[in-house]
């Protein structure tokens, strides 16, 4: 009788022992947090790098518009004189307050680059335009960025910098004068003018 009772109790003891071991492993070996070491007397400590989230974000500097740019728009001057051909290439369009080249714009610029490669005596003038929202100064700077981003894409295709000139007209030469989204979208553009026979 004692032997039989002992056999029944022993498996229960083993079960309880297993539960105790599992509990010890789970709760007794919890991950310890790293504690910074206490500096010893005379030891120089270096402050740790701040985390990405803690680093102050750089605020972009607003591009200043020069009086020379404003004078160009008011006088209607362009960088080069001579025979000009406008409308050979489609205008490229930009999203509101943006100057990044989209995929359809890249197709147009590839055809411009191809033309310049085949006609080495010609240059291209890239005009940057904006819709009429915002100040004249702001739109001059934005139009300049649009023209320059188009030029930069041409340079990436192998066009020599001296063969692509830029000018910004800001909001001074709109294609459409209605105050609608459809009309504003037509005015946010870069326009191309071929300058024939320029060195």
Image (cartoon, helix red, strand yellow):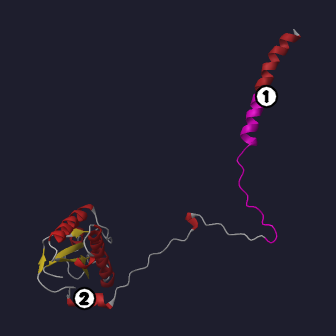
Say whether residue 133 is visible.
Answer: no
Q: Position of residue 176 (x, y in %)?
A: 18, 75
Left or right: 16 with respect to 173? Answer: right
Seen in the picture, residue 75 relative to 5 is either above or below; the reply is below
**Residue plotted at (21% across, 90% down):** 75
Label 1 packing within 10 angstroms: few (<14), some (14-19), many (20+): few
Q: Which of 34 and 2 is in front in this view?
A: 34
Left or right: 30 with respect to 100? Answer: right
Q: Name the residue under label 2.
A: 72
User: Tag 2 or tag 1, which sits nearer the N-term?
Assistant: 1
Q: How far apart are marks 1 and 2 (CA)?
A: 90 Å
Specify the quadrant of the image occupied by residue 162: bottom left
Specify the quadrant of the image occupied by residue 71: bottom left
> Hey, which residue is sitting farthest right in the picture?
2
Q: Which of 7 and 115 is in front in this view?
A: 115
| Range covered by the magenta-colored residues | 18-42
Q: Name the residue under label 1.
A: 17
Residue 190: numbered disc: none
Q: Position of residue 81 (x, y in %)?
A: 16, 86
**Residue plotted at (24% across, 65% down):** 105
Specify the quadrant of the image occupied by residue 118: bottom left
């Amino acid at each position: 009788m004692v032997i039989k009772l002992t056999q029944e109790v022993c498996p229960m003891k083993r079960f309880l022992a297993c539960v105790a071991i599992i509990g010890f492993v789970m709760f007794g070996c919890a991950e310890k947090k790293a504690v910074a070491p206490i500096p010893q007397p005379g030891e120089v400590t270096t402050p740790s790098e701040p985390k990405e989230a803690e680093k102050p974000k750089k605020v972009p500097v607003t591009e200043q518009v020069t009086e020379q740019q404003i004078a160009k728009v008011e006088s209607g001057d362009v960088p080069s004189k001579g025979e000009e051909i406008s409308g050979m290439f489609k205008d490229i369009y930009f999203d509101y307050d943006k100057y990044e080249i989209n995929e359809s714009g890249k197709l147009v610029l590839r055809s411009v680059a191809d033309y310049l490669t085949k006609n080495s005596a010609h240059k291209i003038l890239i005009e940057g335009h904006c819709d009429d929202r915002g100040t004249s100064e702001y739109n001059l700077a934005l139009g300049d960025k649009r023209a320059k981003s188009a030029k930069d894409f041409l340079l990436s295709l192998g066009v020599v910098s001296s063969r692509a000139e830029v000018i910004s007209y800001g909001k001074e030469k709109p294609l459409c004068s209605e105050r609608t989204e459809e009309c504003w979208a037509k005015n946010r553009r870069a326009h191309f003018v071929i300058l024939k026979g320029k060195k």
